[in-house]
Amino acid sequence: MDRRAQLIQIIQAVTKKQTVPEPDESLFDSGLLDSFALPDLVSALEREFSIQIPDSDLNPRKFDSIERIEAYLDSRS
């Protein structure tokens, strides 16, 4: 499974919706995610990709879309 498919699965698990967002679609503006779901998303990303995301990075802008999440993960590797 490629990383984008993994991200979609994580987003679906966190949101409990089967929606497949566009890569550049804002997950927050679309209502899929809110500030309360952000820690759940980050925890799932940490587990799935075996990374540690510092609290200082818990900014919705960094995780606003699939493309932004991919860019963040690229910057961590």
Image: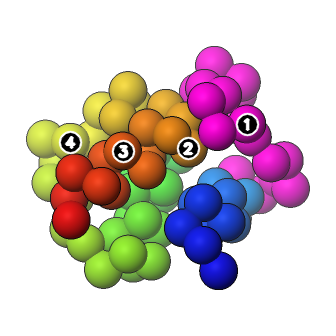
Q: Amino acid at mark 4?
A: Asp
User: Which residue is depicted at the point 45% across and 77% down?
Assistant: 48
Q: Earlier in the sequence, mark 2 or mark 3?
A: 2
Say which mark, if any, is on residue 66.
2
In this figure, which residue is indicated by the disc labeled 1? 22
For the residues labelled 2 and 3, the Cα–Cα distance comes to 9 Å
For the residues labelled 2 and 1, the Cα–Cα distance comes to 8 Å
How crowded pointer 4 is (Cα within 10 Å; few <14, some 14-19, many 20+) is rated as few
Magenta residues, as a range? 14-33
For the residues labelled 3 and 4, the Cα–Cα distance comes to 13 Å
Callout 4: SS: helix
Q: Quadrant of residue 31?
A: top right
Q: Earlier in the sequence, mark 2 or mark 1?
A: 1
Q: Is residue 63 visible?
A: no
Main secondary-structure element of the magenta-colored stretch: loop
In front: label 4 or label 2:
2
Callout 2: SS: helix
How crowded pointer 1 is (Cα within 10 Å; few <14, some 14-19, many 20+) is rated as few
Instruction: Find residue 38 and report its horizontal and vertical position in percent.
Output: 45, 44
